[in-house]
Amino acid sequence: MIRLRLAPLLPALIGLACATPARAEDDADQAVALHGQATLVVQGVGGFATPYAGNNSLAPRQAKETLDLTAYLGLRPWHGAELWANGEIDQGFGLSDTLGVAGFPSAEAYKVGKARPYTRLQRLFLRQTVALGGAALRLDPAANQLGLATTANRLVITVGKFGVGDVFDTNRLAHDPRGDFLNWSVVDTGSFDYAADAWGYSYGAAAEWYQGDWTLRAGLFNLSKVPNGVALETGFGQNQLMAELEHRHRIGTGAGALRLTAFRNHGRFARLDEALAAAGAGVPDPTSVRRPMDRAGLAFNAEQDVTATLALFIRAGASDGAIETYDFTDIDRSLALGGVLAGKGWGRAADSVGLAVVSNAISATRQRFLAAGGLGVLVGDGRLPHPGVERIVEAWYAWRPAPSASVTLDAQYVANPGYNRDRGPAKILALRLHAGF
C-alpha cells in the first residue's frame, strides 16, 4: 500500500523548483552555499510467476514509495577548502523491503525502510583543492561543490563521511537516480562491492590527481562491521582500498571518458564453499565460517557523446564470486549498455529519454549457496533449481517543466529476478518527481 499522498508534496516541490540557486561571484571564490532537493519515487510491480518464495524474494502485485529531502550546506574555511554537511529526511520502502532482485529497480530505496520520516546526517566531509598549474579552470557551484577558480592540473583530497560513488565509478549519463536511471546495476557497476552502510555512505579518504586528460584516484574507506550491516567500522580494521584511472578525450566534437577501477575489501568474510560444507545437508549460514580475508574486483565504465543530442555509456565489472558480498549487492559479473537522448529533435530540448540493458551473473559457487537455501544481500528464494542470468531492461522519459524540476516515467523489465528462471519476469513501473535548487 502506498503510504504517502502526492498532493501535499506538490507545493514543496514547486517551491524548490522556483528557488534561486546559490551563485558564486565571477571574480571571487564562493564562500558559502545552501542547496536543497526533494525526490519522490512511486514504484510498483505487477503479477508474475512465483511457484515458491523465500525470505529474500520479490513479491508480485505491490506498490511502494520513497521520499527524501536533502539540504546541502557548504562553507569555505580557507582558500581551496570546502566543508560540506548534508542533512536528509527519508521515508518509505523499496519493493519487498529492497529485496528480491540483485539489480534492484530503485536506487532511491535504501536497505533500511521506515513508514515515518526520519533524519540522518548522510555526508560531513572536508575537501581541499590544490592548484598545480595548467589552464585556468572555473568549477561552477553545485550541490557539494563551491564555485572555485583553480587550474586544470590539481590535487583534490576529500576526508570525512561521504559516498564512494561521489568520487569513484562516476558516469555523467548513469549515476544519479534522482535524475537519470533508477536501477542499482546501471547507476553503479553491479559487481563493484563498494564500502557503505545501509544508506550508501562510509567514513574514509580519497585523493585525486588531475593532470592534463588523466586523473588518478585512490581511496580508503570503512566497511560495515558485519557484511550488509547498518553500522560502519570506525578504525579501518575492516576496510576497502581502491584505485581508479580516468582518461578524458574527444572523438571529433564528442566528449568522452574511460575509467578503470580496482578494489580490495579486507574484513571478516565467508567463503561460500566453506559455508556449504559446514552446513552439510542444512541451510548454509556464512556467519559460522567468517574469518579475515580479502575480496577483490575490477570495474570499467565509459561515456561518449555520439551526436549533439545522443550519448552512450557502458559499465562492466567482475569480482571474486567464491566469497560472500560485503556491502553492495549479489552480483559477480555485470554488463550494462545504454544511452541518453536529448529532446531537441522533438522540440523539447530540456527533456530526455534513456534506455539501458543489463546482464548480471553470479558464480557457480554462489548458485549452489542459493540453491541450498542460503541468503545473499538482496536475493534468496529458498531454493534455486534452475539458475539463470538476471537480465534487465530500463527505459525512462524525463519531462522538465523547469530547469531544476523533472517528472520521470520509468519502466523496467526483469527476467530471472534473483537469478531464478522459475520466477518472473517482473514488469516494474515508476513515477519520479524531483526538484532542487
Image (cartoon, grey):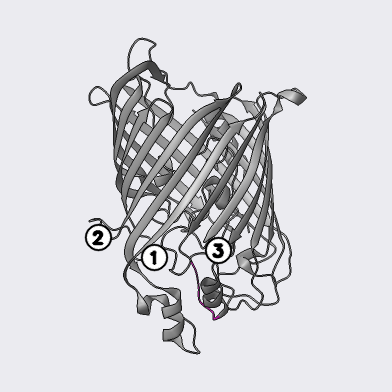
Residue type indicated by callout 3: Leu
Density class for disc 3 (Cα within 10 Å; few <14, some 14-19, many ≥20) is: many
Q: Nearer the viewer, mark 3 or mark 2?
A: 2
Cα–Cα gap, marks 1 and 2: 14 Å
Cα–Cα gap, marks 1 and 3: 16 Å
**Drawn side of residue 367 relative to residue 274, left or right:** right
Q: Which range is magenta?
A: 372-376
Between 212 and 416, the residue placed more toward the observer is 212
Q: Outermost residue toward the bottom?
A: 281
Residue 99 numbered mark, or none:
3
Residue where numbered disc 2 is placed:
237
Q: Is residue 403 magenta?
A: no
Q: Secondary structure at mark 2?
A: loop
Cα–Cα gap, marks 3 and 2: 29 Å
Residue type indicated by callout 1: Pro
Most common secondary structure along the magenta stretch: loop
Residue 317 numbered mark, or none:
none
Q: Which quadrant would the N terminus be assigned to in this image?
A: bottom right
Q: Residue at x 60, y 66 (%)?
A: 418
Between 98 and 241, the residue placed more toward the observer is 241
Q: Residue at x 63, y 75 (%)?
A: 53
Q: Residue at x 39, y 52 (%)?
A: 263
Looking at the rendered structure, the number of numbered marks drawn on it comes to: 3
Between 9 and 335, the residue placed more toward the observer is 335
Residue 227 numbered mark, or none:
1
Contact, CB < 8 Å: mark 1 with mark 3? no
Q: Nearer the viewer, mark 1 or mark 2?
A: 2
Q: Residue at x 33, y 32 (%)?
A: 209
Residue type indicated by callout 2: Gly
